Image (cartoon, grey):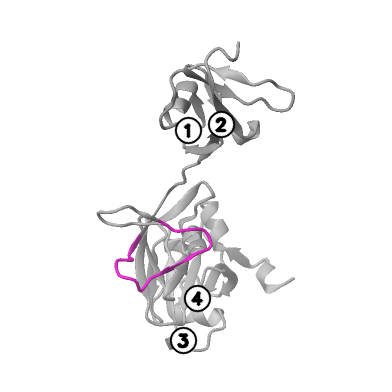
Amino acid sequence: MSIIESHDIDDVELAVQQDRPLRPGRYRVSFALDGVDYSPIILDDPVPLGRQILKAAALKDIDGHSLFVITQESDFEDVRADEEVDLRDRLAYRFIAFSTDPLYRLKLDDSRIVWGQPSIPESVLRSLAGIGDDKAVFLEVRGGTDKLIEVGTQVDLTAEGVERFITAKTKTSYFFFVNGQRYETEKKKLTGAQIKAMVPGWDETHDLALEGHGDEPDRTISDDESISLDPKHGVRRFSSVPKANFG
């Protein structure tokens, strides 16, 4: 049995999830160095000093590292080398240390984040915010349009004005074609009238026709008929045809 799986080791995160007190013995917490790739470390004391946490992570240069505990509110709180962290009262189980200087402080939604590199990957912001694929990270621009942080990119934390990030649901875009021209919308369904309204200079003497799939015939779309643009139906292709061409 490995030390990480020993019966006398209580997992602090699991205890928090189960809303129960820590059992006597030793304690497993998560530790990351210069990033968010966490690994388990074992602490012998439920109220360790900052230096004990760093030593448990096999770091020898104690004074050369800055240690932070991530609170239940996802804030980064500084832990000095001789400062105690009560695992029982703080519900603390995630620690991050940085071996670099200076440190960059920023806000992510309502959380106070500290980062030890001059740039931070979008993937790290996403991880720290705990968001899924239905949300994205934006750099808040005061008095302007918030800037989307593209997937796979990094944000320069030394740039002027970089201090606050927010998360928001991503907007799903649907597209279709009219007379070979591509149009996009955030709406999953559009009526015939709405589709025609998106086409500049629509000829009111023409009807809107939907191209049939396979052996299906083309058909006219009335102004009040609703058409789904969900990709599962295939790409919707429309054309402008003189009235009465379809019956």
Q: Nearer the viewer, mark 4 or mark 1?
A: 1
The mark that comes first in sequence, 3 or 2, is 3
Q: Quadrant of residue 80?
A: bottom left
Q: Gap in Å between the C-alphas at discs 1 and 2?
A: 8 Å
Mark 3 lies on residue: 62
Residue 41 in sight = yes
Callout 3–callout 2 Cβ contact below 8 Å: no
| Residue projecting furthest to the left | 143
The mark that comes first in sequence, 4 or 2, is 4
Identity of the amino acid at label 4? Asp
Callout 1–callout 2 Cβ contact below 8 Å: yes
In this picture, which residue range is highlighted in magenta? Answer: 148-164
Give me the disc on residue 187.
1
Q: Secondary structure at mark 2?
A: loop
Q: Residues within 10 Å of mark 3 (few under 14, many from 20)?
A: some
Q: Gap in Å between the C-alphas at discs 4 and 3?
A: 14 Å
Q: Is residue 86 left or right of residue 27?
A: left
The mark that comes first in sequence, 4 or 3, is 4
Q: Is residue 188 above or below residue 128?
A: above
Identity of the amino acid at label 1? Lys
Mark 4 lies on residue: 34
Give me the disc on residue 229.
2
Q: Nearer the viewer, mark 4 or mark 3?
A: 4
Q: Is residue 127 left or right of residue 166?
A: right
The mark that comes first in sequence, 4 or 1, is 4
Residue 25 in sight = no
